[in-house]
Image: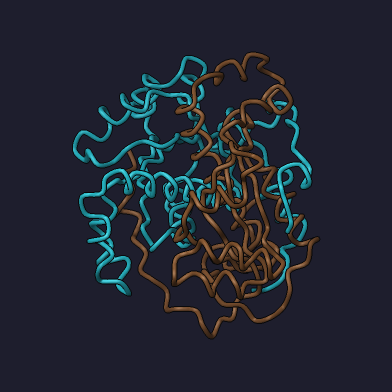
Chain colours: A cyan, B brown
Amino acid sequence: MSGVLDPAALDQLFREARTCQWFDGREVSDEQIATIWDLMKMAPTSMNQLPARIVWCKSAEAKERLAGHAAEGNKDKVRNAPVCAIIAMDTDFHEYLPEFFPPSPDAKAMFDGKEEMRRTQAFRNSSLQGGYFIMAARALGLDCGPMSGFDNAAVDADFFADTPSWKSNFICSVGYGDRSKVHPRLPRPDFARFNRLI
Amino acid sequence: MSGVLDPAALDQLFREARTCQWFDGREVSDEQIATIWDLMKMAPTSMNQLPARIVWCKSAEAKERLAGHAAEGNKDKVRNAPVCAIIAMDTDFHEYLPEFFPPSPDAKAMFDGKEEMRRTQAFRNSSLQGGYFIMAARALGLDCGPMSGFDNAAVDADFFADTPSWKSNFICSVGYGDRSKVHPRLPRPDFARFNRLI
């Protein structure tokens, strides 16, 4: 590793970045979308499970469809975003382990028939990948508006009828945020509050 | 936002970073540990829930205690790491919402008595924070070795007897990786494989 990133990069990724639910009108290109994936896919998941699946709603039709399943206060946020991603998990991720985790030929068999274990691991690892998604978007100069206020079952039925092992985790708008509409920063706890060093 | 981070930063965070389970002997300072928290805590969680709780096992005694609950293949990885963090979630995160989410005075009441909903949200959001943890450590020039091969119930009983609402999520070594012991990069899927753009 190369040392500490410069302060401006730490600001962009963490300290000055803000959740944005409203955007300034600039588009997000298909190339930027693909680059988010190409960065986030490199970060670690357990046994290289890579359970995240993403549907990027960019057309007005797709956003309207997604907005129909969002909580009342989130509908306009989905409609007005340049793109709103459904970050889902494949609970049948183990089918791909022979390809993605070649060091352990028995990896798939560990998960065969164990739906609850697969669901737990897919949820953990697709959420980790959700964190990488947000960091990758910020690294590209974009802002994110993650939301969990929507009807997961309705989204799954509408978007994943052909892939029933895909389950929505959360949704996330991406674009160039309108900083004039960002709320004041919410409080954050000091290290001593939620950490123990032993 | 400020534009795209320079290529070296993208390499350090995503493209050239590698999971490391073996380290080069350099220590991780208490200041570095606190800085990981001070970066990761700034990134978003739903309603500012901030459910992650972290126990940093840095002393030989603490690492030995944690190694005792790890899978056979992970015991020496825990023992030999400069520090190994238990990333946990507080399933009673809602008790803090009056402080951390002041815009919605009713936020706590939404979760009162709803243990399963709290567990789902704590798991999602503490895993997101796990992703931020790994990215923050990498941004500081450190390497991570995340692991889920350990006995969660035994770790909870041993480390969280005084805070029974804390549940372990995953564990993660942190240090300066020994690149000579890193395995070849595992495959990663192209955008078209697991993404849909509609």
- From the viewer's side, name the closer residue of A83 and B82: B82
Location of residue B193 (image quadrant): bottom left
Q: Position of residue B178 (x, y in %)?
A: 59, 81
Q: Position of residue B189 (x, y in %)?
A: 34, 61
Q: Is residue A106 above or below residue B50?
A: below
Q: How many marks?
A: 0
Q: Quadrant of residue B11?
A: bottom right
Examine the image and state in which quarter residue B112 appears: top right
Query: Relative to B74, does residue B192 appear above or below in the rendering?
Result: above
The residue that appears at 54% across and 65% down in the rendered structure is: B68
On the rendered image, what quadrant is the C terminus of chain B found in?
top left
- For the point 66% across and 17% down, the residue is B104
x 50%, y 40%: residue: B123
Residue B151's place in the image compared with A179, above or below, is below
Q: Hey, which residue is sitting farthest bottom in the picture?
A: B180
Q: Locate residue B20, reporting x and y percent.
A: 54, 72
**Residue A63 in picture, x, y percent from top left:** 39, 27
**Going by the image, does A186 lie left or right of A146?**
right
Closest to the observer: B64 or A60?
B64
Report if residue B7 is visible in the image: no
Query: In this image, A143 relative to A116: left or right?
Result: right
Near-viewer residue (B63 or B144): B63
> Which residue is drawn at the image coordinates 72% and 67% (left, top)?
B59
- Residue A33 visible in image: yes
Q: Quadrant of the N terminus of chain B?
A: top right
